[in-house]
Image (cartoon, rainbow, N blue to C red):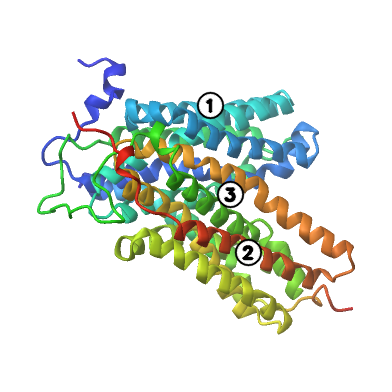
């Protein structure tokens, strides 16, 4: 029980952090990739 | 009843018979995921700039001082950490790191930039260094059969600290922001409280193994060419060529990784013309690979050996960097994202594998202190890495090269740094017996 709770205590915040990053990364896969011209193009 | 000072002493943290060693990794992760907040300091840039009335470079200076102090304090206090044991060190780290956050909150209250630099940079930075090395040698001793995996777990926690620290600070600032306040001061204070609880949990959960303890059923392999069973004290270790070769290995690996990490969002936008939201998303994705790579690569090193895994980091890393200009020329974003994610996973892996590499070469005797001195390579890389990239990028743009293509030169520079690291890694040989500690 102690082992499970100890791991849970660190897994929960880490899992929350990972979820936040996945949420942040979502536009990378969902938004239309090219919004503006690359910097090299006129 | 035991006095508080006795409860913190190394002797009172010896794991009794039947103690489950798998309780030690969560203790280490708890501390590392708190101090990893330093990676997410940039979310305070704008609020602190407004609250203190200082420009952004001065505010960012607090972060740079903190990273510098991390390396310095780890190097200076390494022997004290070994002597005092992990619990006392974790409590000291808590007091300094969380104390630094409290002082930063007061800096907002009194609008004092110097208090921020002193509090977050110096006091908090020393806490970072102590917290970073505190659990490493303990984990190596508890997991002699899988040292790479064990240290990988703790150092993964440090990578995870940024993933937690940034959104937590943003949510808290949103909550506390009001008329005439950015909410930064209150946020720093609340974070100090939350982190104190987690670090205290880690400090009281941690145990050191009894002298001569070994995992049940595990028989230590005979010393091989690459793994010693001898002990090398820190004062001797740092005078050996092996120490300095590993210093170069870490410095080059970190410098090359920071090349992408430091400018990830801008790079993605400049090279592919994507929106700021996608640029931020790219940074988020890299953070996950940075964290995951620490555990994954470090665990792989237990199977392949440390020298082989670092050779993979350098050879594969250089090859991937060499592909990035092609990805830009063909506007292949999937290729770019895939390559950079893998590069960043190896950047994280480099941090996590180094303690096990040190154990292989110098033994477990003072591995924490040796690790502490080696971390100065990180502090140096944190300065030279971004410095090199920014100056090369700026000079190429000034020379008329379009921004999208200006990064290509920096990628080749990263390849060169990785080749230097590879050479240093290949030159690593077992430590001469004359440096081994003589058994009484």
Q: Which residue is mark 1?
A: B99
**Quadrant where the image shows the N terminus of chain B:** top left
Q: Quadrant of the C terminus of chain B?
A: top left
Discs 1 and 3 carry the same chain letter: yes
Disc 1: which chain? B
Distance from disc 2 to disc 1, alpha carbons, whole Å, reads: 41 Å
Residue at 47% in and 48% down: B158
**Residue identified by numbered label 3:** B166
> Pointers 1 and 3 in contact (CB under 8 A)?
no
Local packing at callout 1 (Cα closer than 10 Å; few below 14, some 14-19, many 20+) is many
Q: Is residue B132 above or below residue B422?
A: above
Image position, residue B320 (x, y; %): 57, 73
Which picture quadrant has residue B16?
top left
Q: Chain of mark 2?
A: B
Identify the element where label 1 is drawn.
helix
Quarter of image, res B209:
top left
Q: Is residue B310 left or right of residue B205?
A: right
* Pointer 2 residue: B416
Q: Is B14 on the left or on the right of B312, as rendered?
A: left
Q: Earlier in the sequence, mark 2 or mark 1?
A: 1
């Amino acid at each position: 029980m102690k082992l499970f709770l100890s791991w849970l205590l660190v897994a929960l915040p880490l899992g929350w952090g990972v979820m936040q990053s996945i949420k942040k990364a979502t536009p990378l896969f969902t938004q239309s990739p090219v919004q503006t011209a690359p910097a090299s193009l006129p | 009843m035991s006095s508080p000072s006795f409860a913190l002493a190394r002797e009172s943290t010896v794991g009794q018979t039947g103690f489950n060693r798998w309780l030690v990794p969560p203790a280490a992760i708890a501390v590392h995921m708190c101090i990893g907040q330093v990676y997410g300091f940039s979310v305070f840039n704008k609020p602190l700039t407004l609250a203190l009335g200082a420009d952004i470079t001065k505010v960012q200076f607090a972060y740079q001082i903190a990273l510098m102090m991390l390396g310095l304090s780890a190097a200076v206090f390494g022997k004290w950490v070994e002597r005092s044991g992990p619990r006392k060190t974790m409590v000291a780290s808590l007091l300094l790191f969380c104390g630094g956050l409290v002082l930063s909150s007061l800096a907002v209250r009194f609008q004092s930039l110097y208090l921020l630099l002193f509090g977050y940079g110096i006091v908090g930075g020393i806490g970072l260094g102590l917290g970073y090395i505190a659990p490493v040698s303990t984990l190596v001793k508890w997991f002699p059969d899988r040292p790479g995996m064990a240290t990988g777990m703790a150092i993964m926690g440090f990578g995870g600290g940024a993933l937690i620290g940034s959104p937590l600070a943003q949510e808290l600032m949103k909550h506390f922001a009001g008329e005439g306040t950015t909410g930064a001061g209150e946020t720093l204070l609340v974070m100090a409280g939350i982190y104190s609880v987690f670090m205290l949990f880690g400090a009281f959960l941690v145990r050191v193994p009894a002298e001569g303890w070994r995992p049940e059923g595990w028989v230590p392999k005979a010393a091989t060419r690459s793994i010693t069973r001898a002990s090398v004290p820190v004062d001797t270790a740092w005078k050996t060529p092996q120490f300095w070769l590993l210093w170069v290995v870490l410095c080059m690996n970190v410098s090359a990784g920071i090349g992408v990490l430091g400018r990830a969002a801008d790079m993605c936008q400049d090279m592919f013309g994507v929106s700021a939201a996608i640029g931020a998303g790219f940074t988020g994705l890299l953070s996950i690979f940075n964290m995951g790579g620490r555990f994954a690569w470090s665990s792989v090193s237990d199977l392949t050996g440390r020298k082989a895994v670092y050779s993979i980091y350098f050879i594969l890393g250089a090859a991937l960097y060499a592909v990035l200009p092609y990805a830009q020329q063909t506007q292949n974003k999937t290729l770019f994202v895939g390559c950079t994610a893998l590069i960043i996973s190896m950047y994280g892996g480099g941090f996590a594998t180094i303690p096990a590499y040190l154990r292989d070469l110098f033994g477990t005797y003072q591995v924490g202190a040796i690790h502490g001195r080696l971390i100065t390579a990180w502090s140096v890389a944190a300065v030279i890495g971004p410095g090199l990239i920014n100056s090369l990028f700026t000079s190429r743009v000034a020379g008329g090269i379009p921004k999208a293509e200006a990064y290509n030169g920096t990628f080749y520079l990263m390849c060169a740094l990785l080749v230097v690291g590879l050479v240093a890694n290949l030159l690593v040989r077992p430590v001469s017996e004359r440096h081994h500690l003589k058994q009484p």
